[in-house]
Image: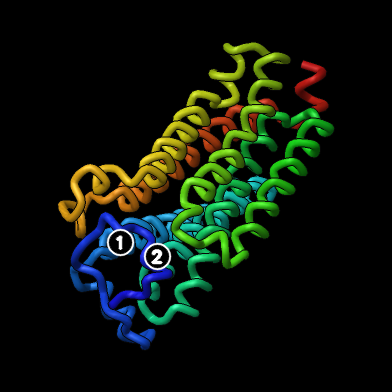
Amino acid sequence: MLFRSLRDNDFLIKGHRPPLNSFWACFKSIFRIHTETGNIWTHLLGFIAFLGITVYFLTRPSIEVQWQEKAIFSAFFAGAILCLGFSFLFHTVYCHSERVGRLFNKLDYCGIALLTMGSFVPWLYYSFYCRLEPKITYLILIFVLGTGCIVVSMWDKFAEPKYRPVRAGMFIGLGLSGVIPAMHYVITDGFYEAFKFASLHWLVLMAVLYITGAVIYAVRIPERIWPGKFDIWCQSHQIFHVFVVAAAFVHYHGISEIAEYRLSFGDCIEAAQS
C-alpha cells in the first residue's frame, strides 16, 4: 500500500507506485508509467528549459546584457529553477518513505513561494524604475508574505490532505498581493502606460494562469467527477503543473519587454531631463 498520509488524492484509484525505499529506484521510476509520471515530466522539462535559459542569459557579454540586469533577472530565474526542481524531485522521491516524502513535500511548497517572490523582483524593479520608495516598500511586502508562506509550509500539519484548499488559498493570496503595486502603477501612470510600458497585460495573464491552475488543483477536477478515469494522465495536479510552466514563460516574456523599454530611456537622471 502507498503511504496513506502522503496519498492526498483519493480520486486516483490505480497506478500508484509502491514504497521503493531507494533513491535509485525512485529515479528509475521516472521512466515508468504511473500516477506521478505526468507530474514529474511536466516540471522536469520546465526545469531543464529554465536552466538553459538562465545559462544563456547570464553568459551574454556585457554589451548585450549588463550585470545589473543579470542580477535582477537572476531572482526570477532562481525562483523558477528552485520551484520546478523541488517539484519534480518531490514527485520523484514521493514513494521513497514517509519521512523523505514529507521533507520534499515541504520543499515543493517552499519552491512555489520562491517562484512567486522571484517573479515580483524584476517587475517591481523596472515598473518603479525611478521611484525608490514604492519599489523598496513592495519588495519588502512580497518578501515578508513569501517568507510567511515558507514558514507555514514547513509545518507538518500543513501537508495533510484536508488542508489542500488552505494551501491553495494561501499561495493564491501571495500571488494576489501583486494587485497592490499594480493598482499603484495604474493610479499614478494610467492604464495606457501600465499596459504598454509596464507589461501589465502579461502580468495579468500570468496571474490568471497561476490562479486557474491552483483552483483546478484545489477542487481536483476532472478526477473528482470521474474517479479512476484520470489516474495516469490529465489529472488536476498535472494540469496545475502545465499552467505553472506556462505562467513562468509568460512572465519571462513580460519582464523582458518591460526591461527593454526601461533601459531604452537610460538612467533616471537622463529620463527626467529629457
Residue 73 spot, x, y in % from top left: 60, 48
Residue 41: assigned label: 1
Dot 2: within a 10 Å radius of its alpha carbon, few (fewer than 14), some, or many (20 or more) residues?
A: many
Dot 1: within a 10 Å radius of its alpha carbon, few (fewer than 14), some, or many (20 or more) residues?
A: some
Compared to residue 182, the image places residue 31 above or below, namely below
Residue sitting at x 49%, y 41%: 252
Compared to residue 211, the image places residue 224 above or below, namely below
Left or right of 217 on screen, residue 128: right
Image quadrant where one finds the C terminus: top right
Between the C-alphas of marks 2 and 1, the distance is: 7 Å
Quarter assignment of residue 42: bottom left
Residue 13 spot, x, y in % from top left: 21, 61
User: In the rendered structure, which disc, 2 or 1, sits on the residue that comes first in sequence?
Assistant: 1
Compared to residue 225, the image places residue 90 above or below, namely below
Residue sitting at x 41%, y 45%: 218
Q: Are marks 2 and 1 in contact (CB under 8 Å)?
A: yes
**Whether residue 96 can be seen here:** yes
Residue 183 spot, x, y in % from top left: 66, 21
Furthest-left residue in this view: 229
Left or right of 175 on screen, residue 27: left
Q: How many marks?
A: 2
Residue 263: assigned label: none
Q: Amino acid at mark 2?
A: Phe
Residue 88: assigned label: 2
Residue 233 spot, x, y in % from top left: 20, 54
Compared to residue 107, the image places residue 216 above or below, namely above
Image quadrant where one finds the N terminus: bottom left
